[in-house]
């Protein structure tokens, strides 16, 4: 939301990694929300998870670019993180709606 209002300038070098970093950050946020609803949230674990998700996802895409398979690895990262996001969203939904 802040990005829509502020409209930051993203360096061209970082542009290929930004969508992957956003998806990785969303995975950490949904995981943190699920942990909070389950009563096991730990702020240190959340921060480490958030940062490590973003860094590892960006590194995978960076290595894929260097190996010439960047788009395939980007797709793989998005699929894996997407599955985790939907899994956490389903757990949150079950917790909130008791269904």
Image (tube, rainbow, N blue to C red):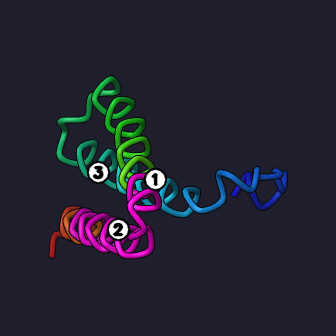
* Callout 3: SS: helix
**Which residue matches tag 2?**
73
- Label 1 – label 2 distance at C-alpha: 9 Å
Among the two numbered marks 1 and 2 on one chain, the one whose residue lies closer to the N terminus: 1
Q: Which residues are magenta?
A: 61-88
Q: To which residue does mark 1 refer?
A: 62
Binning the other alpha carbons within 10 Å of mark 1 as few (below 14), some (14 to 19) or many (20 upward) gives: some
In this picture, residue 58 sits left or right of residue 10: left
Q: On the rendered image, what quadrant is the C terminus found in?
A: bottom left
The numbered mark at residue 31 is: 3
> Under tag 2, what secondary structure?
helix
Q: Nearer the viewer, mark 1 or mark 3?
A: 1
Say whether disc 1 or disc 3 marks the residue closer to the N-terminus. 3
Q: Residue at x 59, y 62 (%)?
A: 16
Residue 51: image x %, image y %? 42, 36
Q: Which quadrant of the figure has residue 42?
A: top left
């Amino acid at each position: 939301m802040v990005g829509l209002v502020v409209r930051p300038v993203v360096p061209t070098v970082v542009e290929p990694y930004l969508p992957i970093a956003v998806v990785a950050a969303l995975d950490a946020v949904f995981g943190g929300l699920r942990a909070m609803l389950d009563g096991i949230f730990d702020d240190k674990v959340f921060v480490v998870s958030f940062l490590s998700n973003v860094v590892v996802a960006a590194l995978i895409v960076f290595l894929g670019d260097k190996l010439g398979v960047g788009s395939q690895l980007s797709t793989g990262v998005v699929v894996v993180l997407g599955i985790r996001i939907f899994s956490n969203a389903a757990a949150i939904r079950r917790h909130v709606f008791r269904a």
